[in-house]
């Protein structure tokens, strides 16, 4: 679960971003909103890297809303599809294929695209399994407030096409032979175990926070 400190930082960033986005704040108000944004950056920046985080926050414009991460649960013969990224922070750990939704896509289009890019498999989204608030699950801290939309995706065939350059490997794993998971993206209980249960009981409604 997210710490109170991180939740405060996310809320402060949201106040600053929204305050700067609407109307025409006076110079005084603009300076105050920028100070609030700086405080948020100070609260989340590791190793005192405040300027970098403030620049990331400053690049966000408009009304502040949660970011949307889509994930696809794909099963084959009782095994679940996982991918391993090349980036150092995730090297050696595995996750459900997925990523940020793009502007102009529906949620189902986004997850089908992400599954294809990261695993090489063509699928179709058949059910929204869960809509999670990342802050309410045991993930490591992240400066952004993120919602995670997780879909059951059905394989269209067994052909595996070329993987995205950021992905090192994509494989199906048996439930009791899972590799080390990337806990920044998924957890065993809320994702793997829960989605296996949804597969066994397809009449269950969507999980949500």
Image (cartoon, rainbow, N blue to C red):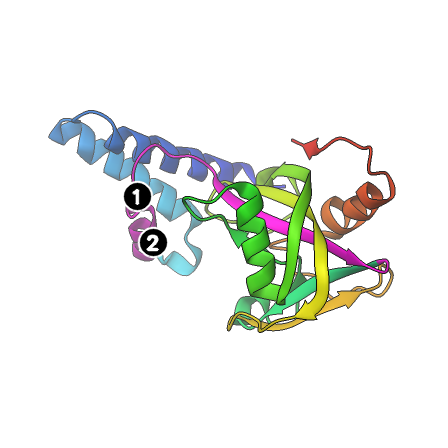
Q: Is residue 84 magenta?
A: no
Hey, which quadrant is residue 33 in on the image?
top left
- Label disc, if present, on residue 38 of the rendered structure: 1
Residue 4 versus residue 102: which sits nearer the camera? Answer: 102
Front residue of 148/58: it is: 148
* Residue drawn where x is 23% and y is 32% of the image: 32
- Residue shown at the point (61%, 71%) measured from the top left: 161
The stretch of residues the image draws in magenta is 50-78
Q: Which quarter of the picture shows residue 80?
A: bottom right
- The spot of residue 119 in percent (x, y) is 63, 65
Residue pictured at 84% horizontal, 66% vertical: 177
Q: Is residue 208 left or right of residue 53?
A: right
Q: Which residue is mark 2?
A: 50
Q: Quadrant of the N terminus?
A: top right
Is 29 on the left or on the right of 174, as rendered? left
Q: Residues within 10 Å of mark 2 (few under 14, many from 20)?
A: some
Q: CA distance from mark 1 to mark 2?
A: 8 Å
At a point 57% along the width and 48% down the height, the residue shown is 70
Is residue 47 in view from this perspective?
A: yes
Decide: marks 1, 2 in contact (CB < 8 A)?
yes
Q: Look at the image and tell me whether residue 141 can be seen.
A: no
The quarter of the image holding the C terminus is top right
- Give the mark nearer the N terminus: 1 vs 2: 1
Query: Would residue 77 be found to the left or right of residue 208 on screen?
Result: right
Query: What kind of element bears circle 1?
Result: helix
Indicate the position of residue 59 as horizontal and vertical percent values: 29, 48
Residue 173, percent from left and from top: 79, 65
Q: Quadrant of residue 64?
A: top left
Q: Identify the element where label 2 is drawn.
A: helix
């Amino acid at each position: 679960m997210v710490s109170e400190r991180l939740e405060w930082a996310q809320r402060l960033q949201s106040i600053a971003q929204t305050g700067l986005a609407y109307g025409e704040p006076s110079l005084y108000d603009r300076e105050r909103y920028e100070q609030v944004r700086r405080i948020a950056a100070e609260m989340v920046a590791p190793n005192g890297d405040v300027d970098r985080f403030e620049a990331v926050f400053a690049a966000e414009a408009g009304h502040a809303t949660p970011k949307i991460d889509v994930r696809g649960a794909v099963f084959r013969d009782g095994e679940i599809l996982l991918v391993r990224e090349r980036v150092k922070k995730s090297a050696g750990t595995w996750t459900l294929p997925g990523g940020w939704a793009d502007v102009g896509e529906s949620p189902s289009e986004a997850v089908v695209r992400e599954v294809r890019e990261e695993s090489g498999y063509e699928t179709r989204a058949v059910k929204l399994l869960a809509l999670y608030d990342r802050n309410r699950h045991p993930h490591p801290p992240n400066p952004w407030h993120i919602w995670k939309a997780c879909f059951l995706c059905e394989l269209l065939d067994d052909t595996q096409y070329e993987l995205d350059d950021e992905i090192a490997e994509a494989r199906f794993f048996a439930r009791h032979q899972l590799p080390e998971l990337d806990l920044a993206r998924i957890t065993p209980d809320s994702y793997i175990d829960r989605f296996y249960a949804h597969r066994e009981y397809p009449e269950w409604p969507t999980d949500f926070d």
